[in-house]
Amino acid sequence: MEFARITLPREASGPVREGPASPSGASSPAPLLDVEGLTKRFQGVVALRDYRLVLHEGEILGVIGPNGAGKTTLINLLSGFLRPDGGRIRFRGQDLTRLPAHRIPALGIARTFQNIRLFPSLTALENVMVAMAVRDPPDVPSTVLGFGPWQRKIRRMQDEAMALLEQIGIAHLAHRLAGTLAYGDQRRVEIARALALAPSLLLLDEPTAGLHLEESEALIEQLSRLHRERRMAILMVAHDMPVVMRFCPRLHVLNSGILLAEGTPEEIRNNPLVLEAFLGRLGRSGTA
Ligand code: ADP
Ligand code: MG
């Protein structure tokens, strides 16, 4: 067994270079995301402790760990839904540690939710269009003074939203109310809505939770294709080991808020700390 590349968080001091060099090569540019010492407490519980991460443009990272490990807390911190108690988040060199959630999407960070949050009484298409309006709000003079330009803008948004639904495989459900869609399709609408923000970092919180194996594999296949086409970085939190191991060339393992190990899926699979903390537990509960 090979544990050489597994590093424990306590060893980290200062910014750590990890992951592949940027595709542009040359003099290594600033990472897309640079997180140091990130800490979040809830009353007595330390949900995330001294977490660090360097993610480059276009990279895919899987974050795995048992329930309560701090995975959703990490996504909430990166997307501004929670304020950290310590540490720092830099995105393209900009410090966004204290920015409120509504300022984050415009910077190029989009997320989905573990518990799906759609407007159930809007159609799938409208849910995606709402996100576009966030990215590119209608300007008041043209909406008041000119019906034509406004109509053209709506039409463009519709076409773009439809193209996103098509890419994620649910164009045929565009006019169905989101609340009436099957679970897996609601997850797809959420992903299309996140993509509508044209993110350079996509944060996915358990995108395959509640899906059957075949559904999960189909979704991962679509995500892989989207990644090839768009080259955005993806941080995917997951639980579903076979799926995450296939999709993510690099993994972080969280346990009780601590970065327990990192490495390739193969390294993680063979790491005794991980086996004990996570796989063993899943193995016993039979949900792996
Ligand atoms: P995961 O997504 O890995 O299952 P979470 O990030 O949701 O884990 O939770 C990590 C820990 O923080 C858990 O002990 C959880 O109970 C606690 N926690 C998360 N969110 C809150 C909150 N809003 N208030 C209080 N405790 C929370
Ligand atoms: Mg969670």
Image: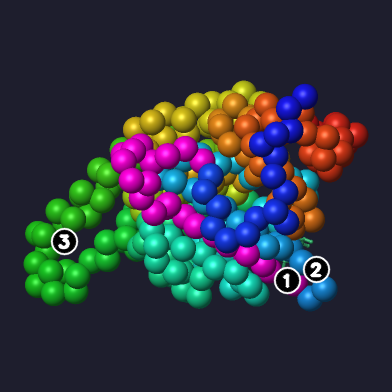
Question: What is the tally of numbered marks visible in this picture?
Answer: 3
Residue wearing tag 3: 150
Measured in 3D between alpha carbons, the distance from the residue under mark 1 to the one under mark 2, in whole angstroms, is 6 Å
| Mark 2 close to ligand 1, CB under 8 Å | yes
**Is 179 positioned to the left or the right of 25 in the image?**
right
Amino acid type at circle 2 is Val
Is residue 26 visible in the rendered structure shown here? yes
Front disc: 1 or 3: 1
- How far across and how far down the image is residue 287, in percent? 80, 34
Quarter holding the N terminus? top right
Q: Determine which quarter of the picture holds residue 187.
A: top right
Magenta stretch: give its range. 19-42
Residue that carries the numbered disc 2 in the rendered image: 45
The response on whether ligand 1 sits within 8 Å of label 1 is no
Query: In this view of the protein, which residue sits in the foreground, 141 or 241?
Result: 241
Residue depicted at x 33% and y 38%: 25
Graded by Cα atoms within 10 Å as few (under 14), some (14 to 19) or many (20 or more), the crowding at tag 1 reads some
Helix, strand or loop under label 3: helix
Q: Amino acid at mark 1?
A: Arg
Which part of the image, by quadrant, shows the C terminus? top right
The answer to whether 97 appears left or right of 39 in the picture is left
State the residue in front, 167 or 262. Answer: 262
Q: Earlier in the sequence, mark 3 or mark 2?
A: 2
**Residue 179, position in %: x, y?**
54, 50
Name the N-terminal-most of marks 1 and 3.
1
* Left-right relation of 179 to 42: left
Q: Quadrant of residue 58?
A: top left
Instruction: Locate residue 50: give its quadrant.
Output: bottom right
Report, in whole angstroms, how far the alpha carbon at label 3 lies from the one at label 2: 50 Å
